[in-house]
Image (cartoon, grey):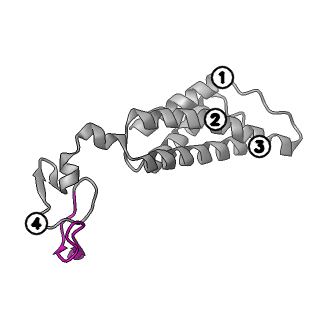
Amino acid sequence: MAQLLRHCVNHPRRETRVACAACGEPICTDCMRETPVGMKCPSCARISLHARALGKPRHYVMASAAGLVVATALGAVVTIAHIGFFGIIPAILIGLAVGKAVAWGAQGHRHRGFMAIAAATTVLGLTLGELLAAPRHGGAVLAASLLGLVFAGIAAAWMAGH
């Protein structure tokens, strides 16, 4: 399968088929840095593994938004459906879904900060979803089980980190 020719990120007049193993930007032979995991661009070759795992600010924003949206939606759905999501199994499943959304928003970064975002957005989003959905159904806001929130937060953090 032939790869597309692209222009080097640092040298726009040079065509290449090689991309940086870390960031995916196209790089020419002058920009290539050989590493144990393949060719990298000069900037990625300088960055330590720990620093790359941290992610960029946009990754934190996207991860937070994705986690909050999914958790709020799931909190509203289970409140409307009267599922009682704060049992252990449903809470874990909801936490895993929110953790997966945070991992998606983080675009593969697995730093502990994303695990904390997953746990926080789970608790905040489930509570917010419940508050938004309960008045529309004429009932008072259900008292959220603290144990269910803990299990959902732990499951979300675990999923975001793996």
Q: Which dot marks residue 146? A: 1
- Residue type at numbered disc 4: Thr
SS type, badge 4: loop
- Between residues 36 and 77, which one lies in front from this camera angle? 36
Q: Is residue 115 left or right of residue 126?
A: left
Distance between the Cα atoms at labels 3 and 2? 12 Å
Q: Residue at x 14, y 61 (%)?
A: 31
SS type, badge 3: helix
Q: Magenta segment range?
A: 1-20
- Residue type at numbered disc 1: Leu
**Which numbered disc, 1 or 3, marks the residue closer to the eye?**
3
Few, some or many residues within 10 Å of mark 2 (<14, 14–19, 20+): some
| Residue 82 visible in the snapshot | no
Q: Residue furthest top?
A: 147
Q: Residue at x 12, y 47 (%)?
A: 36
Q: Are marks 4 and 1 in contact (CB under 8 Å)?
A: no
Q: Which residue is mark 2?
A: 124
The disc, 2 or 1, on the residue closer to the chain's N-terminal end is 2
The disc, 3 or 2, on the residue closer to the chain's N-terminal end is 2
x, y percent for residue 124: 63, 35
Few, some or many residues within 10 Å of mark 4 (<14, 14–19, 20+): few
Distance between the Cα atoms at labels 4 and 2? 48 Å
| Residue 37 visible in the snapshot | yes
- Residue type at numbered disc 3: Leu
Quadrant containing the N terminus in the rendered view: bottom left
